[in-house]
Amino acid sequence: MAVGRAVSGAGEDGMASDGGLRDPKEAAPEGSMEVLELFPRYLLKGTLPDALLSQLQAMASAVIADPDSHPDAAPKLAGQLSLQRELGPQQPAAAELCSTVILPACEHWIRHVIDRQPPQGRGPWTPGRYGLQMIDLWLNVQHGGDYNPTHTHGGSFSGVLYLKVPPQIRSDSFDGQLCLHGPEEWHIQSFRTGMAHYLLPRAGDYYVFPAWQPHSVAPFRGEGERWSIAFNVVAVPAAARSATPAPLQVSEGRGALPPLAPQPAANVSLSNSRPRPGGFG
Ligand SMILES: [Fe+2]
């Protein structure tokens, strides 16, 4: 937590008693003061096991080589990308990704965030009272000039993992970076800072964030391809689970839950063909 330097000797309007701007060096602090950060946002970052990253890269290569073998996800998505294809649990690497990485990561996010809430403010997100369902999973292939405008997703959690990143995407440029947007426009002149957070994609890294978190991807220049897999997950309170759509994969929130009712054959379900909460974005 940052600690501010005291400034005193003037009224609350920041003016000296004679009406001029005061010299901060004249400040004579008494007592103490500090700057508090309010309303945090939580972003989970992880790294894929090398073996799973290799499997996912091979899966992506196969999809790119035969894109018509997978449903086109682009009509449901905001991105202006060269290729976006739905993935499903029939692909072993995708199934392993869901069960060993994404759903546990969402569970980790819930426990990290909810366990810090007051006991009476946790609502349905106490262990054993909810389930997690993967509802959308898709591959993004971005070429130079492609971009993803600011958007949000359906469901409860969304995120992305990176499979391949061209070398010209670096931290010294916005090109190709994932940007998470705050609630206001960034404006340094009026100290409205901290409203944009850039994440440099690296093969093997992944991120999980609430589906309502606005984000965008800047275009990059030059050769190469930027590959990523994105997803939507819903967290479903136990009482509402019977009304939810067929999941791609299911994970129980920590603790014992009765088994889910039998579900139809799992596959990617699109947001216009199932009740809310919808997926994609
Ligand atoms: Fe997105």
Image (cartoon, rainbow, N blue to C red):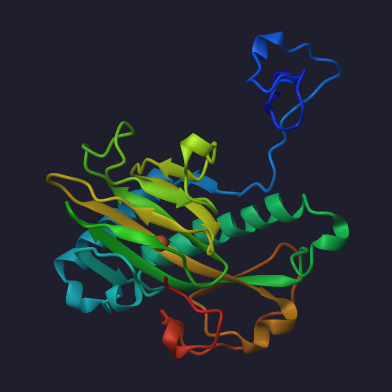
| Residue nearest the observer in this picture, 266 or 14 | 14
Residue 9 location, x and y as percent?
77, 18
Q: Nearer the viewer, residue 188 or 169?
A: 188
- Give how far across and how far down residue 146 sits, in percent: 21, 57
Residue at 24% x, 59% y: name it: 141
- Residue at the spot 55% in from the left edge and 48% down from the top edge: 44
Q: Is residue 100 visible?
A: no
Question: Measured along the vertical axis of the image, is residue 94 above or below residue 89?
Answer: above
Q: Residue furthest left?
A: 223
Residue 195 vertical placement versus 237 (above, below): above
Toward the viewer: 80 or 244? 80
- Image quadrant occupied by the N terminus: top right
Quadrant housing residue 94? bottom left
Residue sitting nearer the eye, 37 or 25: 25
Extreme residue in the front direction? 18
The image position of residue 112, as x and y in percent, is 69, 50
Query: Hey, which quadrant is residue 12 in on the image?
Result: top right
